[in-house]
Amino acid sequence: MKVSYLALSLLGGAMLFAGGAQAQGKITNHQAEGNLQVTHNVGCIAREDAKTSYTPADLYTSIFDCIEKEQYGSAVDLYVMAFARGTFDMQRVKDKSSYQALSVLRMVTFQRMNEAQRTAFGAALENYSKDGIAEACDFLQGQDAPDYYPKYMIAHGMGAFTNKDDDGLVTPFDAAAAWQLTLTKAGICAGK
């Protein structure tokens, strides 16, 4: 079985953060209200039940719930969806310093897992293969663009402290076109 490039890059990101590398030295943590905030705590859901109002922060909480229930197929489906939505948000959020929100959500989620969970999730992600990515592409292309305000990401960047009178979004913005472009740019629909 040939594993797709997207599956390998997602797996690599997951395993990198699962290792739990720790920073050394004194860290001062300043957070803006809404930073990485979960707005819908829905538990483990199937991707078909993920509303366009669910942010990547919501989905990462759901991913962990699925992993806790050993529903790794659902966890991988939601992981790919969270990746796509986070990539979409990077197109519509002005502040590039906020883009690390997606990596931090991934890191926090994988640090919560025990070694057996990380191994099982990694295997499920590897097995997602070309067919899984193709199915994800078809599913996500049939979905409307996310319609939430990406506060979880905007509040993660420096702009949350310096641009308080700005909503943080790119204008004008064509959400439908950006969603389809996202699916290609993220590698989910790269072959289509």
Image (cartoon, rainbow, N blue to C red):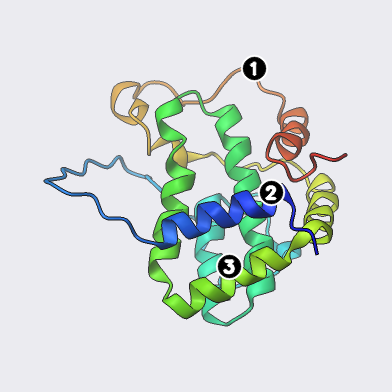
Q: Position of residue 7 (x, y in %)?
A: 68, 54
Give the quarter of the image for residue 74.
Answer: bottom right
109 relative position to 51: left or right: left
> Whole-Å distance between the Cαs marked 2 and 1?
30 Å
Q: Position of residue 151 (x, y in %)?
A: 46, 40
Crowd rating for badge 1 (residues with CA inside 10 Å; few <14, some 14–19, many 20+):
few
Q: Amino acid at mark 1?
A: Pro
Give the quarter of the image for residue 181.
Answer: top right
Tell me the residue that label 3 is attached to. Answer: 122
> Upstream in the sequence, badge 2 or badge 3?
2
Residue at x 63%, y 44% (from the top left corner): 85
Q: Amino acid at mark 2?
A: Leu
Crowd rating for badge 3 (residues with CA inside 10 Å; few <14, some 14–19, many 20+):
many
Front-most of residues 42 and 63: 63
Q: Looking at this view, name the residue that lies furthest to the front.
A: 1
Residue 6 numbered tag? 2
Q: Position of residue 89 (x, y in %)?
A: 58, 36
In the image, residue 96 sits, relative to residue 110, either above or below, namely above
Q: Position of residue 109 (x, y in %)?
A: 44, 62
159 relative position to 7: left or right: left
Element type at mark 3: helix
Tell me the residue that label 1 is attached to. Answer: 172
